Image (tube, rainbow, N blue to C red):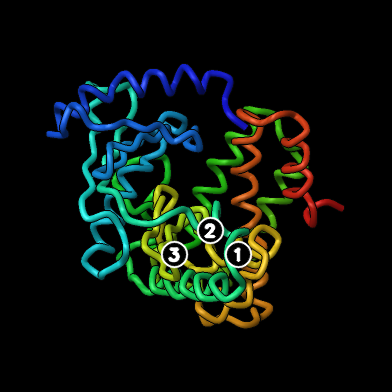
Amino acid sequence: MRTPDHLLVKQKCREAIPRILKEFGFDPSSDIIMDDQGWVNPCFFIGREAIVRFNARDQHIPKFQREKIVYDRLRTLNFPVPAEVRLDTSKTISPYDILIASRLNGSNLEQHWKLLESSAKSTLAFQAGQWLRKIHDVNIDTFGEISAFGPFPSTVTWPEYLKARLEYHLSEARELDIFSAELEMRFEAAFEKIIPLLEQTKRSRLIHGDFHLGNLLFEKHQITGILDFEWSCAGDPLFDLCKLRDMDASWTGSQESFNRGYGVSVFDDSEFKKMRIYTMIQNIELCVVAKKYFPAKELRSYVSATAKGFQT
């Protein structure tokens, strides 16, 4: 669902393109193609050279600052990420933060998934699992926020970060009157109860934050790009994996091969307990987004899913 003013926002972004071409040394006669899928971060292709994205919806979140940090780190580790990433946060070219990245070869895996043969699906899903595992093998010095900006902290422990994030999203939800006071208390009590288990996470690792087939590029039978680290943070890899337990529902024939590539088979009781809380926090955030931008019916489904298991 798109925001009511998404066409106006895209037009503002489109008007900034000529100046971006000039300021960043692109050929002014370059072909410019707007990606119709990019409404959260309006996206424009500059020929075969680069992609320009605008942080138009979540201006209070340092999405592109995170993304540049991660791309620059992963490039040194031979990940398939853009060779060059430039960031403009001056607000002089556009009212929004701008990220300019060199283009990668390949097509969107999610958009082509149904057209692929079973063998290709198995190969690519396996590689997707391998790449996520490699992402999770990247150590980060602190927990939580990986940039020096935004509403979330960089913390010494994993539960410190999660508590700050939970409180932030509950505060947002309270202002929008999404949950009852009793349900909010149940969310908070569930989190407090599991803190001793969360404290066992001593190693902080890179979390993608939005890993799925729509954020992967492929060419033939090879993953050629890993994209959109704007929601990345540092902590427990289960924060990613809790959203990747039912991949077949969206991408038929992907789950088994993905699991083999990642090297995961079954989760133990403590992992399920942690993933329950991670999902709760993520869903509370989604409810806030749904309240702001989605139809009422869709909001109700998010609220119902979030409340499930925390009501009497």
Tell which of 229 and 1 is nearer to you: 1
Q: Is residue 177 left or right of residue 73?
A: right
> Which residue appears at 65% of the width and 54% of the height?
280
Percent across and percent down for residue 96 are: 34, 27
Percent across and percent down for residue 102 are: 25, 48
In the picture shown, does residue 103 fall above or below 43? Answer: below
Which residue corresponds to mark 1? 244
Tell which of 163 and 125 is nearer to you: 125
- Circle 3 — which element? strand
Instruction: Tell me the kind of residue under disc 1.
Output: Leu
> Which residue appears at 41% of the width and 69% of the height?
222
Instruction: Tell me the kind of residue under disc 3.
Output: Gly
Q: Earlier in the sequence, mark 2 or mark 1?
A: 2
Which residue corresponds to mark 2? 212
Instruction: Tell me the kind of residue under disc 2.
Output: His
Q: Is residue 3 left or right of residue 268?
A: left
Which residue corresponds to mark 3? 235
Q: Nearer the viewer, mark 1 or mark 3?
A: 1
In the picture shown, does residue 72 fall above or below 6? Answer: below
